[in-house]
Image (tube, rainbow, N blue to C red):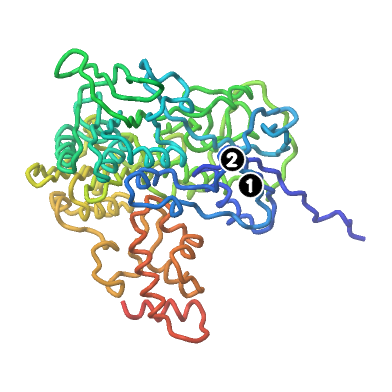
Amino acid sequence: MSDPQQGLRVPHRVVVVGHGMVGARLADEVSRRDADGALDVTVLGAEPYEPYNRVLLSDVVAGRTDVAAIGMPLVDDGRTRVLRGTTAVTVDRVARLVLADDGTRHPYDHLVLATGAAARLPDVPGLGTDATALPAGVHALRTLDDAREVVAATVNTPRAVVVGGGVLGVEVALGLAGRGLPTTLVHGAGAPMDRQLDDQAGAVLRGGLETAGVAVRTGVRPQEVLVVGGRAVGVRLDGATTEPGETLGAGLVVLACGTAPETALARRSGLAVERGVVVGPDLATVTDPRVFAVGDCAQPPEGSRGLVAEGWDQARRLAEHLVALAARPRPAAAVPAGPREHLRLPGDGAGPSMAVRLGTLLSSRAPGARAGGVDTRGTDVVKVKAGPLSVVAMGRCGSGRVPAPGERAVRLGDPAAGRYVEAVVADGVLVGATCVGDARVAADLTAAYTRRTPVPADPAFLLLTPVMPAAEPATSPEHMPDDATVCRCNGVTKHDIAACVANGASTQGDVARATRATTGCGSCTEAVCGLVEWLARARPAGPETEDQAVGEVHSSV
């Protein structure tokens, strides 16, 4: 007689702390893979909103994107429970229990910290140390509420100062200037985006900013934020000033000075924390194998660069790992007293996917290098969302790049035309690139870099000549190759979108839910909408299979 209990399986309880871009992506990745319901997922999110694309907040400030358009796909599988407006305050690792601020208790078999990062505040008089208690008129663009407040402030203020000339600072300054607000960008280094760009590229970017109406002040830092009656009225500068105590008047001050990992909960829980929560190649903490960390709060062996691509790829890898653990139950283990040795994830295909290539920092690595057993190539492409001003950097680039044996760099400097392109090649492939002022070449270089396309014998052709088919140059969807990438952020091709339309998708939202297209940087939204409309018109009327519909659409290409 068979055992009536045989085959019964209790779902593994997974608690995710954080419902931002990475936490929400992890829940979605698990839902897509856990067809058998082996995992019971609870997500605790401190913000009261549905998940949204934080990368697009600068687009909201610029007026290019509406708040309603930056939402991320929701998980609706009946097994994932999302508690918005709920903050985790304590973790009992012995009892495997998370206590929230509303008094609820959440038991877990596996805990994932996706607490993200907080805005870093410059240590100057007038600001204090609490980003939630800044003077009126001063904002750190990190949340949806921050974006709304910045937009509201543009209505009544005569001028603005953006502190910090990294990726976010450049985007915000251009966005405010685009709204007609006189804006000054203050940056301590000699050129904006100095972490990603060399001096020549930085000079071209500076020219583009000034052409767009942004006053650029480099080599200066805020010495004090002047506050009168609880409201900011200006910024006093230090450094290469025109006169001692130089002051820039401003009713709006936006701080874009980087971020710091949110590690308070991890520290209170007794987990090892350096800059971030220390994890191994499998993303488990070195203190407790049942606790994982992903995204901006994590410190993996290969380092953390603040890239959304990195966090989304970690979410994918961890989802695969958790589903595999649930499929192969193992006995409970006691919490170890000290650090443990980590193993690589099984399989040779566990390297990062071609996820969204966004972020604020780049690393310089040898081509094809693996750090801590994880291939990090393809997750370090930075694209500035700045309307007509195109700035893209990837891989081995910038003033910090030290030439490696076998590398060859070719450059095109055309300051008068607002253009600068550098391509770095090694072993027959592109290992790094910088492109300012030429969106088409930038898109082509990105494709060559992420796909490891063999470069021409003379790499100078990379500076001007397209080397890969791309969606952008196509004059009609009919002329796009089947494998043309439409959404580079999530690796979505024309074929993927055609399959969605064949399955009944009729709107951009339908395609986004199925493929995640348009949920990254958002620059492909117009192309996706146009493609969906064209595909819907091209689809024959009447019942048909997906293969028939996709085949008929592709037969015209």
Q: Vertical placement of 2 versus 123: above or below? A: below
- Name the residue located 48 percent from the left edge and 50 percent from the top edge: 349
Residue 93 in view, yes or no: yes
Please, what secondary structure does the residue beneath circle 2 have?
strand
Q: Residue at x 35, y 28 (%)?
A: 257
**Dot placed on the residue nearer the N-terminal end, 2 or 1:** 2
Front residue of 446 and 429: 446
Residue closest to the far top: 244
Q: Which residue is mark 2?
A: 45
Residue at mark 1 = 82
Contact flag, marks 2 and 1 (Cβ < 8 Å) = yes
Q: Nearer the viewer, residue 80 or 145?
A: 145
Mark 2–mark 1 distance (CA, rounded to whole Å): 7 Å
Going by the numbered disc 1, the residue's amino acid type is Val
Residue sitting nearer the eye, 309 or 81 = 81
The answer to whether residue 214 is left or right of residue 276 is left
> From this viewpoint, which residue is outermost toward the right?
1
Residue 183 location, quadrant: top left
Q: Identify the image quadrant of the N terminus.
A: bottom right
* Amino acid residing under circle 2: Gly
